[in-house]
Amino acid sequence: MGNLNVKLIVYPNCKLSAIDDSSYTDLPDKYGTIFKSIADYVSLEFLTYSDSKEIEPNTIIFENYCHNRDNYLKDSIFPIMKDGIHFYYKIVVPKLETLFIQNSEGLYTKVFLENQTFYYNNKFYIGKVDYNTDPVTKRELLEKINEILETSKSEIITNYTELYELSGSQSFVCKKIVFTTCKLTQCLVNLQRKIIDYQIYNKCADYKKITEERDFLISTIYVLDYLKDIGNFQEAQRIIENVMECGSICDFEDDICLLYTSPSPRD
């Protein structure tokens, strides 16, 4: 299994950019080097939120590579629907034909499927055992696909987080954590713009409540940034969830809820 080098950037408009800067290299195994080109692979990217195994809405990106540089510095964009912990996944899986093993005469005698994840006919699979055959051409082997899948005890994988966990030695994978506060930041900017408008156009207005909300958000974002920097994502997530329980961002239903978050059970 190869590890990917993916850079994650969260933009102010709450879009997450994933840039793949990986140097895809050979993955030697017991049958020698199989990887030849990224065009022999497909990729799957998605996000999950916090402790949930469910994929976040509108975050699945699938690519069926056709050329060797299809992946190079490609920018995948994902919407961020709410602040907090997000897990980014990328799985690059070989197409079934990539696992066909040639002998010295250029004929095929084996399909390397033992504990390998692969893609065939719009589905992801996990193989259990290798498929062996007398020397045949690639065309002849392709005519035996159903037999290959049955003999190798290959099973369809529909759960994509499970696909990541089961990824075989000929796959490339990446899992990264990112903590976002872009929704809170947007809220803070909107509140500050209201205060500016009051000061310019309605100097006599009482905007104490909005000022308190702004100050609360400034303090919250400051604490969250600190917790993120030291890697205490769980405590940061607790604070985010407490703030969100008060109502949707910038639509707090209770001043007490706005100005107070319940202490941690550890306290």
Image: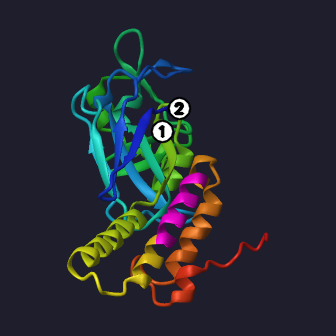
Judging depth in this view, the residue of 210 and 244 nearest the camera is: 210
Q: Is residue 98 magenta?
A: no
Above or below residue 37? Residue 245 is below
- Extreme residue in the bottom direction: 254
Residue at mark 1 to residue at mark 2: CA–CA distance: 7 Å
Where does the magenta region start and end?
215-226
Tell me the residue that label 2 is attached to. 1
Q: Is residue 219 magenta?
A: yes
Question: Residue placed at 45% from the left, 60% from the top?
Answer: 181
Q: Amino acid at mark 1?
A: Val
State left or right for residue 176 relative to residue 71.
Answer: right
Judging depth in this view, the residue of 178 and 43 nearest the camera is: 178
Judging depth in this view, the residue of 243 and 1 nearest the camera is: 243
Q: Secondary structure at mark 1?
A: strand
Question: Residue placed at 45% from the left, 50% from the top?
Answer: 88
**Residue 21: percent from the left, percent from the top?**
37, 30
Question: Residue placed at 33% from the left, 40% from the top?
Answer: 42
Tell me the residue that label 1 is attached to. 173
Q: Secondary structure at mark 2?
A: loop
Above or below residue 4? Residue 243 is below
Q: Earlier in the sequence, mark 1 or mark 2?
A: 2
**Residue 207: percent from the left, percent from the top?**
37, 83
Image quadrant in which you'd find residue 199: bottom left
Above or below residue 19? Residue 88 is below
Q: Amino acid at mark 2?
A: Met
- Extreme residue in the front direction: 204
**Residue 182: percent from the left, percent from the top?**
39, 60
Q: Residues within 10 Å of mark 2 (few under 14, many from 20)?
A: some
Mark 1 touches mark 2? (CB < 8 Å): yes
